[in-house]
Image (spheres, grey):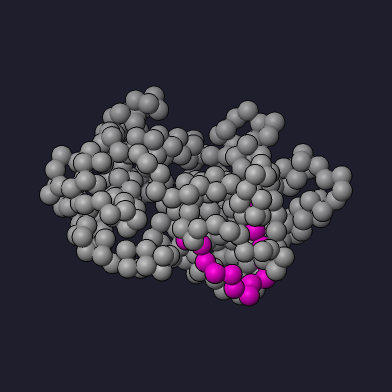
């Protein structure tokens, strides 16, 4: 399926598109406005920290208000709405999967972090003053390291791991029932498979077989992580792509239904309305006016 949105590397966000850097940290007041399209996808992870001020971020049609003493996470493949720069105090950390996993062969280390690569969790985390101060101290250490003439990639990566572990601890402390790491890893493996096969109308059994578990086990995992069955997660991913196609292309409802392997357009329309409470055409009209006209 043709990609609808531009994919940007970290280099694009420092206005050096050919720069293959895998880690950057910048304060808002020191940043130039990146020359990127308002609506885009990242090839990297981004953590925004806000000390003062309020901003708004949009990820896949969901709008979030980012308040002081908060962190906001953007993961690869999420459709991010670029907001105008506001008078904020804080900054952004950008890093690739390869940078995080440098000298670590086990990719599950990244999957164990519940707040990354999770389209079902709130990407904005509000912290109390003490926890934010602890996290900010680690951010300051990263900034100091990056400004050294002899800066070390190994030290920066270690500090990044400490920062992310601090965030995970804050989340776990506030959660009554922390998510099982094993379930989290399997769910993210399922999500990665779903991102590759969502247009093929595959069943829960297909994905369970790919993960070498039973369909029942996969349902237990998705219910624990998202509150939804695996079939509901599969349908939601398909409808998300339908939303994107309705908003950002001129394809008809029938063409979109065919592209996403629905048996017929009427069944697609019924499924879409059950998921969104809007008909495909009503959604297209509303969202095209909201997103396409303001970005012409």
Task: Mark yes or no: residue 243 visible.
Answer: no
The residue at the point 25 percent across, 41 percent down is: 259
Spot occupied by residue 269 in the image (x, y as percentages of width and height):
17, 52
Q: Which residues are magenta?
A: 80-94
- Image height check: is 44 above or below 208? below
Figure quadrant of residue 257: top left
Furthest residue toward front: 296
Figure quadrant of residue 104: top right
The residue at the point 67 percent across, 64 percent down is: 32
Q: How many marks?
A: 0
68 or 172, nearer to the observer: 68
Quarter of the picture containing the C terminus is: bottom left
Horizontal side of residue 45 vs 79, given as left or right: right
Spot occupied by residue 174 in the image (x, y as percentages of width and height):
54, 58
- Image height check: is 111 above or below 124? above
Examine the structure image and report whether residue 167 is included in the region drawn in magenta: no
- Image height check: is 110 above or below 41? above
Spot occupied by residue 294 in the image (x, y as percentages of width and height):
41, 69
Spot occupied by residue 283 in the image (x, y as percentages of width and height):
26, 62
Horizontal side of residue 122 vs 44, given as left or right: left
147 or 189, nearer to the observer: 147
The residue at the point 59 percent across, 36 percent down is: 109
Quarter of the picture containing the N terminus is: top left
Horizontal side of residue 17 vs 61, given as left or right: right
Horizontal side of residue 139 vs 209, given as left or right: right
The residue at the point 45 percent across, 53 percent down is: 79
Task: Mark yes or no: residue 57 visible.
Answer: yes
């Amino acid at each position: 399926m043709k990609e609808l949105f531009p994919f940007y590397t970290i280099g694009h966000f420092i206005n050096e598109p050919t720069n293959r850097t895998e880690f950057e940290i910048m304060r808002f007041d020191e940043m130039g406005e990146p020359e990127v399209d308002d609506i885009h996808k990242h090839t990297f992870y981004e953590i925004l920290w806000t000390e003062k001020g309020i901003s708004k971020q949009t990820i896949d049609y969901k709008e979030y208000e980012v308040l002081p003493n908060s962190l906001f996470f953007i993961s690869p493949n999420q459709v991010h709405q670029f907001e105008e720069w506001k008078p904020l105090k804080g900054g952004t950390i950008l890093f690739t999967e390869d940078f995080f996993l440098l000298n670590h062969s086990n990719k599950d280390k990244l999957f164990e972090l519940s707040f990354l690569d999770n389209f079902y969790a709130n990407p904005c985390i509000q912290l109390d003053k003490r926890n934010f101060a602890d996290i900010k101290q680690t951010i300051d250490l990263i900034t100091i390291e990056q400004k050294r003439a002899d800066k070390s990639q190994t030290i920066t990566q270690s500090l990044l791991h400490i920062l992310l572990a601090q965030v995970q601890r804050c989340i776990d402390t506030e959660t009554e029932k922390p998510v099982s790491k094993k379930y989290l890893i399997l769910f993210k493996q399922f999500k990665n498979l779903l991102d590759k096969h969502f247009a093929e109308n595959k069943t829960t059994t297909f994905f369970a077989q790919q993960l070498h578990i039973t369909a029942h086990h996969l349902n237990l995992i998705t219910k624990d992580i998202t509150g939804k069955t695996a079939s509901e997660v599969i349908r939601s991913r398909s409808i998300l792509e339908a939303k994107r196609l309705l908003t950002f292309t001129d394809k008809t409802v029938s063409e979109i239904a065919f592209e996403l392997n629905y048996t017929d357009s009427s069944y697609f329309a019924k499924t879409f309305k059950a998921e969104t409470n809007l008909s495909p055409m009503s959604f297209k009209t509303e969202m095209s006016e909201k997103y396409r006209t303001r970005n012409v």
